[in-house]
Image (cartoon, rainbow, N blue to C red):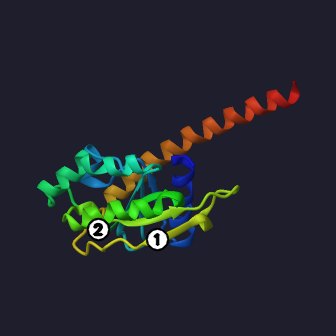
Amino acid sequence: MNSSHVRASIACHFRYSCQCPIIIFERAPGILSATYKPDLIAIRKDRKVIEVEIKVSLSDLKNDINKRHWKLREISPKNYPMPYMFYYGIPYEIKDKALEVIDGWKKDGKLCGKAGLLCVIERENIGFKDVICERKALLNKAALKPSIRDIISIVKHQTGTLCSLSIKIAKMGKKQEKRILI
């Protein structure tokens, strides 16, 4: 299972099962946007932010603790705030080992030890029904909500991403049409 599969399933989960009106790929709201681009962000109707980092291997998960955004959040939590909820999104097959890693971080008092765990079951059809919440994230009740200005900026950037993706899909369709005609 690749990161695109995990990301698509979790995005659909938040959009359709959780009814989050805004799903963002590779873009952070507000102050974090200059230093960190999470794999996926869901913004709830009440503007609370759910952040997801996609990890498809155990080594990828273990290395996440060394990322700059965790260090910045540890050193300066006011300048680099945690979201309302933070999750790791992983393939279901690595869930037991991933829980051990997160429990170790929690025991050590690390911020990433507060993470929840979303597991994606591999199926032929990708969709929101493939996601299991193995562990709920600890809530950060002090989390800042993105401003309306932040949300407008995010939506603007995401529409650009959607346009780029639609062009790629159209090109893929043309290639398949050529193969069928040949």
Mark 1, Cα crowd under 10 Å, few <14 / some 14-19 / many 20+, is some
Query: Is tag 2's residue or tag 1's residue first in the polypeptide sequence?
Result: 2
Residue 84, numbered circle: none
On the image, the x and y values in percent for residue 7 come to: 51, 53
Residue 140 higher or lower than 80, as above or below: below
Residue drawn at 37 percent across, 51 percent down: 61
Q: Is mark 1 on a helix, strand or loop?
A: strand
- Quadrant where the C terminus lies? top right
Type of amino acid under label 2: Lys
Residue drawn at 81 percent across, 28 percent down: 179
Q: Which residue is identified by label 2?
A: 114
Residue 82 seen anywhere in this rendered image of the structure: no
On the image, the x and y values in percent for residue 65 come to: 27, 51
Type of amino acid under label 1: Glu
Question: Residue at the left extreme?
Answer: 75
Mark 2, Cα crowd under 10 Å, few <14 / some 14-19 / many 20+, is many
User: Foreground: 97 or 170?
Assistant: 97
Question: Residue at the right extreme?
Answer: 181
On the image, the x and y values in percent for residue 14 come to: 50, 66
User: Residue 35 is drawn in which quadrant?
Assistant: top left
Q: Is mark 2 on a helix, strand or loop?
A: helix
Q: Is residue 180 found left or right of 141 in the rendered image?
A: right
Question: Residue at the top extreme?
Answer: 182
Residue 179 seen anywhere in this rendered image of the structure: yes
Q: Which residue is identified by label 1?
A: 134
Residues under numbered marks 2 and 1 in contact, where contact means CB atoms less than 8 Å apart: no
Residue drawn at 18 percent across, 51 percent down: 72
Separation of residues labelled 2 and 1 (CA atoms) = 13 Å
Residue 152 higher or lower than 167, as above or below: below
